[in-house]
Image: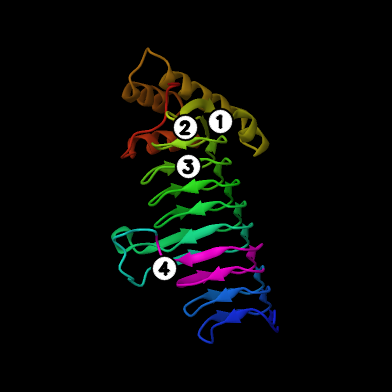
Amino acid sequence: MAHEIHETAVVDSDAELGDGVAVGAYTVIESGVVVGANCRIGPFSRLTGLTTIGASNHFESHCSIGAAPQDLKYAGEPTRLEIGDDNVFREFVTFHRGTPDGGGVTTVGSHNLVMASAHVALVCHVGSHTICANAATLAGHVAVGDHATVGALSAVQQFSRVGTHAFLGAFTAANRDCLPYMRTVGGRPAVCYGPNTIGLERKGFSEESRKALKQLWRYLYGAKYSTAEALEKAREEFPEVAEVHEVIRFIETSKRGVVLGRG
């Protein structure tokens, strides 16, 4: 299948384009970039660096994909950006390559929606089926689990994690790990308000799982138990509820600490 490349676009001869790729006006695709089949790259975008892009991705316009990391220690090493399939990148989004000290690669899964002006920095690892709303920002070394939502104008601090199915409300400033399945909202400090009940119901989670997560949150938030005691009680009470054990693992493996209480 032939490519559809606008006459004003500049595509380096060393770039690789899969079948059916469409490239818009004034877009630049540089050496080292590999674009999968049926991608649409809108006008005024720049794809650069050692960047590998899967199939059927849509870059709306003015996207900067694969630029060098914003790190004073970076000295031009051959680091990478790897993107999966069927993602939508809206206007003015920016994704940077990795740095050697973080493994050298920034990764993005599949079926994500990245809204206008969102930024993903060096050595981030974004899962699949996530949403980054307008102007959401992931600082370096951030990991975002599958099905998570990062709200508009939110920022996640370096080396923090956002758990699977987590929901970060607009304007959130997350300086610690944000729990799976929970709602984290607000700035300095961000606070957790328990399970994202409506969102989990819409996504088809069982009533049993939703109730178990609510009870786990009561144990964590209440004054009766320490965090360790709350996790042990939930582990004993809900031995078969996978979502509860995902939260327990997330907390126990946290290096920065997690967002829990309100204030």
Circles 4 and 3, Cβ within 8 Å, touching? The answer is: no
For the point 46% across and 66% down, which residue is it?
67
Query: How far is the residue under mark 2 from the one under mark 3?
Result: 26 Å
Return the mark for residue 90.
Answer: none
Return the mark for residue 155.
Answer: 3
**106 lies above or below 178:** below
Circles 4 and 1, Cβ within 8 Å, touching? The answer is: no
Residue type at tag 3:
Ala
Residue type at tag 1:
Ser
Q: Which residues fall within the magenta stretch?
A: 43-69
Left or right: residue 175 versus residue 25 is: left
Pointer 4 local density, CA inside 10 Å: few below 14, some 14–19, many at least 20: many
**Residue 157 place in picture, x, y as percent:** 40, 42
Q: Which residue is mark 2?
A: 244
Of 25 and 245, which appears nearest the observer?
Answer: 25
Dot 2 falls on a residue whose secondary structure is: helix
Residue type at tag 4:
Arg
Pointer 1 local density, CA inside 10 Å: few below 14, some 14–19, many at least 20: some
N-terminal label among 2 and 1: 1
**Residue 180 place in picture, x, y as percent:** 48, 37
Circles 2 and 1, Cβ within 8 Å, touching? The answer is: yes
Query: How far is the residue under mark 1 from the one under mark 3?
Result: 29 Å
Q: Which residue is mark 4?
A: 80
N-terminal label among 2 and 3: 3
**Is 163 within the magenta?**
no
Circles 2 and 3, Cβ within 8 Å, touching? The answer is: no
Observer-side mark, 1 or 3, equals 3
Q: Quadrant of the C terminus?
A: top left
Dot 1 falls on a residue whose secondary structure is: helix
